[in-house]
Amino acid sequence: MAYGTPAGPADIAPYYTHIRGGRTPSPEKIAELAARYDAIGGLSPLLDITRTVADALQAASGVPVYMGMKHWHPFIDATVERMHADGVTGGAAIVLAPHYSRISVGTYIKTAKETIGRLGGPHLRFVESWHLHPLFITALADRVRAALARLDASRGAHVVFTAHSLPKRIAEFQDPYPLQLVESAKAVAQAAGVTRWSFAFQSASATGEAWLGPDVLDALRDLRAKDVHDVAVCPIGFVADHLEVLYDLDVEAHRLAHELGMRFVRTESLNASPEFVAILAAIARDALETTAPPSA
Ligand code: FEC
């Protein structure tokens, strides 16, 4: 399961409305979002990347792989319906986001479970988080090292790990999201032999409530004030190139770093790399091995 993305400009308004739980955004907000898609070439590559990952995983595992999206076609509920119609009785369900929050990964799972409840199957084993999977940590550590190699090591480069911000109210239900993010960042830094690193959130929405910080843009200003000139950003909360990586980091954060006189690089995303397919195959195998047989 993945986030979903508009398939064309006409989808932007209904997609945004779906993200907001059915509340239609103002024309100004829709225009702002359309401008961000324009700035990354018109569309996000997220759906294509996810489809390539699904096909590669199916080829590698020999098990049928279905793809369902949280906010656009093919929606998760339609995918579960298709699995049921195809006669699938059991399987593993993985969200392409490594860290669990009740209001992110939790809602993918809730949607799938509601559809399963309505149909009476298939029996799926849900993987809630995989943020410390050894193959994930190794793949990111390799990418951090490669990013640092593009900077001037003699100038004391700093790594900023980032993930999507969420409203601060998640603390009210002891959500594991912030802790899991720091656990991943710590493990990757250690595996890459990096000692100068920090964590920041990105992509907070202007919803009127407080969101988790520090924001990556403030983190960059802070580092510059501390005389850091070279920064590598690693979006540890995302697995693919999409709007939040290609715009919020590659355009917005990059532009700020440039204005501050800093050198800025971003780690390569896992996308449809063989390493990522291997990570998913390992997670799926573990989940399938522990799946209880479907009840008769
Ligand atoms: O490339 C694409 O077309 C899709 C990029 C995309 C990804 C993504 C991932 C996450 N989001 C998470 C939480 C929220 C919350 C709100 C929210 C709003 C948006 C908007 C767009 C958007 N998100 Fe997203 N998110 C992506 C795109 N996200 C577009 C609407 C415009 C805006 O606010 O910037 C606020 C909802 C509200 O207003 O009520 C909360 C989280 C993730 C990472 C985990 C995951 O992938 O599921 C958490 C990719």
Image (cartoon, rainbow, N blue to C red):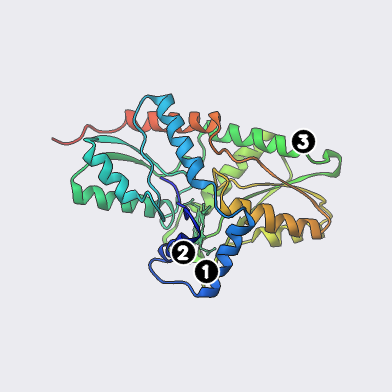
Return the residue nearer the eye: 176 or 149. 149
Give the Cα separation between the discs numbered 2 and 1. 8 Å
Count of numbered tags: 3
Q: Earlier in the sequence, mark 2 or mark 1?
A: 2
Could you tell me residue 131's position as x and y percent?
A: 51, 41
Q: Judge depth for marks 2 and 3 and give the one in front.
A: 2
- Of marks 3 and 1, which one's residue comes earlier in the chain? 1
Residue at the location (56% across, 69% down)? Answer: 31
Please tell me whether residue 207 is drawn above or below residue 61 in the rendered image.
below
Q: Can you tell which quarter of the image residue 288 is in?
A: top left
Q: Tag 2's secondary structure? A: helix
Residue type, numbered disc 2: Tyr
Q: Which disc number belongs to residue 123?
A: none
Asked if 137 appears above or below 41 in the picture, the reply is above
Q: What is the spatial separation of the Cα atoms under label 3 and label 1, in whole angstroms?
A: 39 Å
The residue shown at (77%, 56%) is 257
| Mark 2 → mark 3, Cα distance in angstroms | 38 Å
Quadrant location, the N terminus: top left
For disc 3, the neighbor class at 10 Å (few under 14, some 14 to 19, many from 20) is: few
Few, some or many residues within 10 Å of mark 2 (<14, 14–19, 20+): many
Residue at image mark 3 = 149
Give the residue number, with chain letter if any, for mark 2. Answer: 16
Towards the viewer: 283 or 65: 65
